Amino acid sequence: MEHELTQQQAREIALLRRRHPGAELLAHQKPWGVIVEVRRGDRTLALERFDWTGAALADRRIQLAAA
């Protein structure tokens, strides 16, 4: 099954790009959604998780989000 981000989730990604100009954005697909990681060099600046149900959740511990 193919999944797509909602418009709100796409806006959240655009905000991440604006907050961190020039940083690399990486998307890590998971069975429940996507983790978007913002990196500069070897340093992670931000993580945000996007659930396929349309939620954008940034407040979960990374151990839970990475599973």
Image: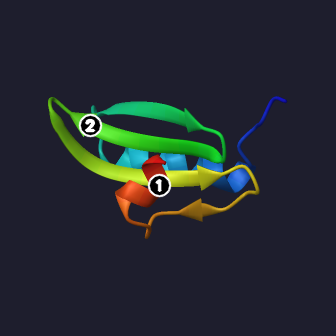
- Residue at figure coordinates x 30%, y 45% from the top left: 20
Q: Is residue 25 left or right of residue 9?
A: left
Could you classify mark 1 by the number of other residues whose Cα lies within 10 Å: few (under 14), some (14-19), or many (20 or more)?
some
Question: As drawn, which residue projects farthest toward the right?
Answer: 1
On the image, numbered disc 1 is attached to which residue? 65
Judge whether 53 appears above or below 28 on screen: below
- Residue at figure coordinates x 52%, y 46% from the top left: 13
Please state which amino acid type lies under the numbered disc 1.
Ala
Please state which amino acid type lies under the numbered disc 2.
Arg
- Which residue is more in the foreground, 66 or 45? 66
Rendered-image quadrant of the N terminus: top right
Q: How far apart in space, not on screen, are marks 1 and 2 (Cα)?
A: 17 Å
The colouring scheme, among rainbow, by chain, secondary structure or one colour, is rainbow
Q: Callout 1: helix, strand or loop? A: helix
- Which residue is more in the foreground, 16 or 30? 30
- Which residue is more in the foreground, 51 or 6? 51
- Which residue is more in the foreground, 13 or 34? 34
Indicate which disc residue 39 carries: 2
Give how far across and how far down residue 42 sits, in percent. 15, 32
Residue 26 position by quadrant? top left
Q: Callout 2: helix, strand or loop? A: strand
